[in-house]
Image: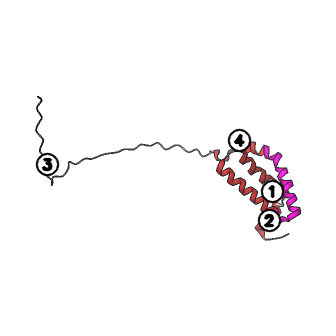
């Protein structure tokens, strides 16, 4: 039969545990930032969307011109901003090519149908002429 070794004596309750020192060294290489990073522009995606929006933008501009004649400038501006805002929200939420085309189409249609430059001057200067 194997012998069981005697149990070691427990240290007294007032004795402190042995002192342990832990050294942790972290080395992390920072990624080098390039100063000329234009990836956020998404040039290829926007260029393709603009090419399609050149075709679909005049359809939206025709609809806005009809609203401008029927409802007046307030209704047309509201419809243009509502469509542009909705397209921006959809593009931000889904980030699909179709939603980017909707953003550009709503922008081109508003610029093509509404007096954007004169309204911008009116808002900036307060002059109606």
Lower position in the chain sequence, tag 1 or tag 3: 3
* Circle nearer the viewer, 2 or 4: 4
Mark 2 packing: few (<14 Cα in 10 Å), some, or many (20+)? few
CB atoms at circles 3 and 2 under 8 Å apart? no
Q: Label 1 belongs to which residue?
A: 110
Residue 70 shown left or right of residue 83 in the figure: right
Residue 32 shown left or right of residue 41 in the figure: left
Which mark identifies residue 11? Answer: 3
Give the overall secondary structure of the magenta segment.
helix
Q: CA distance from mark 1 to mark 4?
A: 23 Å
Element type at marker 2? helix
Q: Nearer the viewer, residue 88 or 31?
A: 88
Q: Label 4 belongs to which residue?
A: 44
* Circle nearer the viewer, 3 or 2: 3
Looking at the picture, does residue 58 appear above or below residue 1? below
Which region is colored magenta?
51-75
Q: Nearer the viewer, residue 27 or 103?
A: 103
Measured as percent of width and height from the top left, residue 55 is found at 83, 45
Q: CA distance from mark 3 to mark 2?
A: 87 Å
On whether residue 63 falls in the magenta region, the answer is yes
Q: Label 2 belongs to which residue?
A: 121
Q: Residue at x 86, y 65 (%)?
A: 72
Measured as percent of width and height from the top left, residue 74 is found at 81, 66
Looking at the picture, does residue 16 appear above or below residue 70? above
């Amino acid at each position: 039969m194997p012998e069981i070794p005697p149990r070691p004596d427990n240290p007294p309750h007032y004795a402190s545990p042995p002192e342990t020192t832990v050294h942790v060294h972290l080395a992390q290489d920072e990624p080098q930032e390039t100063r000329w990073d234009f990836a956020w522009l998404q040039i290829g995606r926007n260029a393709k969307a603009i090419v399609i929006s050149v075709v679909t933008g005049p359809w939206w501009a025709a609809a806005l011109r009809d609203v401008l004649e029927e409802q007046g400038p307030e209704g047309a501006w509201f419809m243009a901003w509502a469509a542009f805002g909705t397209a921006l929200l959809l593009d931000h939420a889904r980030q699909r090519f179709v939603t980017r085309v909707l953003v550009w189409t709503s922008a081109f249609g508003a610029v093509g149908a509404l007096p954007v430059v004169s309204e911008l001057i009116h808002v900036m200067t307060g002059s109606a002429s």
